């Protein structure tokens, strides 16, 4: 396919990110609460599933825009000089670069959002003040490495599947994939990657919520892993796997559909 310009990727990514985050927010909240050490009911059960939406919405457009502009730029740069049979490696490298950039925005908003979803605070302002008072500015980046450690394997699995499926379908039918086909590829790629990376997601949620059911703080990723295992063995690492897979499958569908749709609309206007 033809290359996507930086501006198109930036705007299309922003549109896609916002639409998914707002539409599927309740599933994300349920997932966070299932992963809460205090248990689902104590974290709020099915009440107030839109808690923390403001924080998520504030981060979704810049996060997705940063991801896609970095992804498309790196992908174009790498695929130009590399033989086609190594292109899936280029997609992996490009998506990793995109994730590292997007996490600069995503992690602070995620920290605020998950604390609100778990009912630890009532308002965004209160959460921000608490983080600043207790941990300083660096408190917003708690779980940054774990988030990157969750996102990179996720992208490594998702993007080659996504780009590969699109290529195969295009070859099979003799013309470019449609927006609907794109979104289905995104859904399959996303759902599979989501299920596989759930254990990393559980660790990240715990780090961001900060302490266990007894109020004892988590000290880094290794300590968190040991303590989750002690709670209930390996199955604890799959808490929230259902909503996470469902959220990201539907999300992948809406996200890539909105991205490809917005890309062709915006591309037609500015490229």
Image: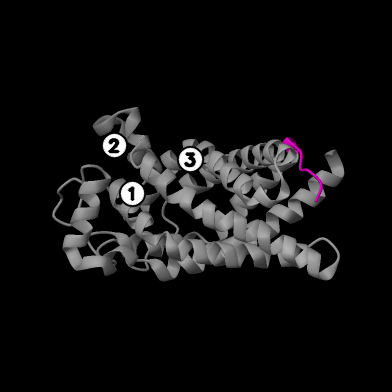
Q: Quadrant of residue 166?
A: bottom right
Identified at 31% across, 61% down, the residue is 35
Q: Circle 2 sits in a helix, a strand or a loop, which is it?
A: helix
Residue beneath disc 1: 115
Crowding at mark 2 (Cα within 10 Å: few <14, some 14-19, many 20+):
some
Question: For the point 62% across and 48% down, which residue is it?
Answer: 91
Q: CB of mark 1 within 8 Å of CB of mark 2?
A: yes
Gap between marks 1 and 3 measured at Cα: 17 Å
From what the image shows, is residue 128 above or below residue 191?
Answer: above
How packed mark 3 is, by other alpha carbons closer than 10 Å (few <14, some 14-19, many 20 or more), is many
* Quarter of the rendering occupied by the C terminus: top right
Left or right of 262: which side holds 110? left
Residue 13 in percent (x, y) is at 65, 46
Position of 226 compared to 59: left or right? left
Q: Residue 260, can we see it?
A: yes
Question: Which residue in the structure is indicated by mark 2?
Answer: 130
Please give the range of residues in magenta: 1-7
Give the Cα distance between marks 1 and 2. 11 Å
Residue 3 covered by magenta stretch: yes
The mark nearer the N terminus, 3 or 2, is 3
> In the rendered image of this protein, does residue 17 appear above or below residue 79?
below
| Residue 48 visible in the displayed image | no
In the rendered image, which residue does mark 3 sit on?
Answer: 103
Identify which residue is drawn at 39% across, 63% down.
31
Q: Main secondary structure of the magenta part?
A: loop
């Amino acid at each position: 396919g033809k290359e996507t310009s930086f501006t198109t990727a930036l705007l299309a990514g922003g549109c896609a990110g916002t639409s998914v985050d707002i539409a599927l927010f309740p599933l994300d909240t349920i997932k966070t609460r299932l992963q809460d050490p205090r248990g689902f009911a104590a974290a709020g059960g099915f009440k107030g599933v839109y808690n923390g939406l403001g924080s998520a919405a504030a981060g979704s457009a810049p996060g997705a825009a940063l991801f896609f502009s970095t992804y498309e730029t790196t992908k174009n740069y790498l695929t130009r000089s590399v033989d086609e049979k190594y292109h899936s490696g280029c997609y992996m490298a490009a998506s990793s670069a995109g994730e590292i950039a997007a996490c600069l925005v995503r992690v602070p908003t995620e920290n605020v959002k998950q604390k609100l979803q778990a009912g630890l605070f009532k308002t965004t302002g209160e959460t921000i003040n608490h983080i600043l008072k207790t941990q300083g500015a660096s408190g917003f980046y708690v779980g940054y490495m774990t988030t990157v450690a969750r996102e990179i394997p996720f992208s490594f699995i998702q993007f080659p599947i996504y780009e590969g499926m699109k290529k195969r379908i295009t070859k099979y039918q003799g013309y470019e994939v449609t927006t609907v086909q794109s979104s289905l590829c995104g859904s399959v790629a996303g759902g599979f990657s989501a299920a596989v990376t759930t254990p990393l997601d559980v660790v990240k949620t715990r780090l961001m919520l900060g302490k266990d059911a007894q109020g004892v703080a988590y000290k880094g990723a290794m300590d968190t892993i040991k303590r989750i295992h002690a709670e209930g063995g390996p199955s604890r690492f799959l808490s929230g796997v259902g909503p996470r897979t469902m959220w990201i499958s539907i999300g992948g569908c809406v996200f890539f559909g909105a991205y490809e749709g917005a890309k062709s609309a915006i591309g037609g206007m500015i490229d």
